[in-house]
Image (cartoon, rainbow, N blue to C red):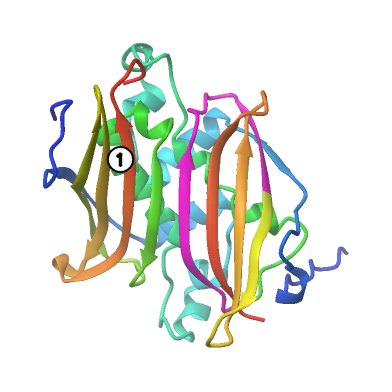
């Protein structure tokens, strides 16, 4: 029996902490699951004829950020009661189906705000197989404990 | 839509019905199985009184709107900023995702559009999510 993952608590999240990179492939299954779940059926994702003029099929941009949260929770669980206060994306390069992305999270701010709430802000960067940044996510969280 | 945009122009809205199956689908997709999203019995006892959709799924809807309006330029330079989660989106909600061009910056043949985005529910009475989408059109890519 494997022991449960430990909770990731505020004291584990000092500014500058970097997490183990998470690697995944943009598979057809992942693209289809995204289209089904979100309901986003842009032809650029699936219609070779229409996408041809734009340089070929691309993956939904959101797939480059799909594991933003998971990238800092690979070895831990999230304590209950946290709040996602905000999130920002920057899409830098279209992701092609079949691409292998590497996502790494870093704590760029960690502090108690004036109301004594534990604020943890992450910078999460996804890179493609060439090492180019394809997506940058900033995730602003209020940590529960 | 034309290739030239003006401040004040509305983006074609998208609407969706949210149900627990869609929320469960996002949990599978993202690996976020927080019980507040996927366990109705647990969620009923929280301050939310029931399950709520994942915040990042809402951002997927904003991405969909921007991709449908602008296509590839959104995927290679689009920025989603100033996102605020103002009210939870729940199973049973009918949501409308909309946007309006707030400001246009012209630089030669290129246009940078600043679009106010929002997700409303309850027949438009409740704003659930707001954000600012910034996209540059023009040049060889678009």
Question: Please, is residue B108 above or below residue A141 in the view?
Answer: above
Q: Residue at x 24, y 68 (%)?
A: B127
Residue A91 on the magenta segment = yes
| Residue B38 falls left or right of residue A128 | left
A120 or B63, nearer to the observer: A120
Q: Residue at x 59, y 48 (%)?
A: A67
Image quadrant assignment for residue B84: bottom left
Per the image, label 1 sits on a secondary structure element best described as helix
Question: Please, is residue B11 above or below residue B116 in the view?
Answer: above
User: Which residue sits furthest right?
Assistant: A1
Please state the horizontal and vertical placement of residue A53, each as a whole percent of the image.
33, 11
Please state the horizontal and vertical placement of residue A10, each as a whole percent of the image.
70, 75
Image quadrant assignment for residue B129: bottom left
Q: Residue at x 25, y 47 (%)?
A: B115
Question: Please, is residue B34 above or below residue B47 in the view?
Answer: above
* Magenta range: A80-104
In which quadrant will I find the N terminus of chain A?
bottom right
Q: Chain of mark 1?
A: B
Residue B135 on the magenta segment = no
A50 or B134, nearer to the observer: B134
The residue pinned by badge 1 equals: B66
* Callout 1 crowding tier (Cα within 10 Å): few <14, some 14–19, many ≥20: many
Please state the horizontal and vertical placement of residue A111, each as a whole percent of the image.
64, 75
B124 or B75, nearer to the observer: B75
| Numbered circles on residues, count | 1
Please state the horizontal and vertical placement of residue A52, each as a whole percent of the image.
37, 12
């Amino acid at each position: 029996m494997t022991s449960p993952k430990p909770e990731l608590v505020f004291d584990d999240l000092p500014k500058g902490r970097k997490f183990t990179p998470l690697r995944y492939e943009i598979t057809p299954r992942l693209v289809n699951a995204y289209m089904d779940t979100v309901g986003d059926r842009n032809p650029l994702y699936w219609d070779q004829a229409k996408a041809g003029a734009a340089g070929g099929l691309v993956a939904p941009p959101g797939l480059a950020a799909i594991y933003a949260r998971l990238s800092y929770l690979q070895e831990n669980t999230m304590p209950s009661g946290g709040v996602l206060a905000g999130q920002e994306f920057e899409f830098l390069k279209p992701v092609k189906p079949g691409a292998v992305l590497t996502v790494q999270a870093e704590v760029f701010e960690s502090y108690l705000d004036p109301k004594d709430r534990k604020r943890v802000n992450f910078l999460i960067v996804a890179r493609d197989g060439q090492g180019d940044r394809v997506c940058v996510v900033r995730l602003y969280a209020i940590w529960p404990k | 839509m034309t290739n030239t945009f003006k401040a004040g122009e509305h983006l074609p809205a998208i609407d969706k019905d949210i149900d627990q199956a869609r929320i469960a689908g996002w949990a599978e997709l993202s690996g976020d199985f927080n019980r507040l999203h996927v366990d109705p019995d647990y969620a009923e006892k929280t301050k939310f009184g029931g399950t709520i959709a994942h915040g990042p799924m809402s951002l997927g809807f904003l991405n969909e709107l921007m991709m449908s309006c602008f296509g590839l330029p959104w995927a290679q330079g689009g920025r989603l900023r100033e996102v605020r989660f103002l009210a939870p989106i729940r199973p049973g909600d009918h949501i409308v995702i909309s946007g309006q061009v707030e400001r246009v910056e012209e630089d030669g043949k290129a246009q940078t559009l600043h679009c106010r985005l929002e997700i409303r529910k309850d027949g438009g009475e409740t704003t659930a999510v707001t954000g600012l989408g910034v996209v540059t059109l023009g040049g060889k890519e678009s």
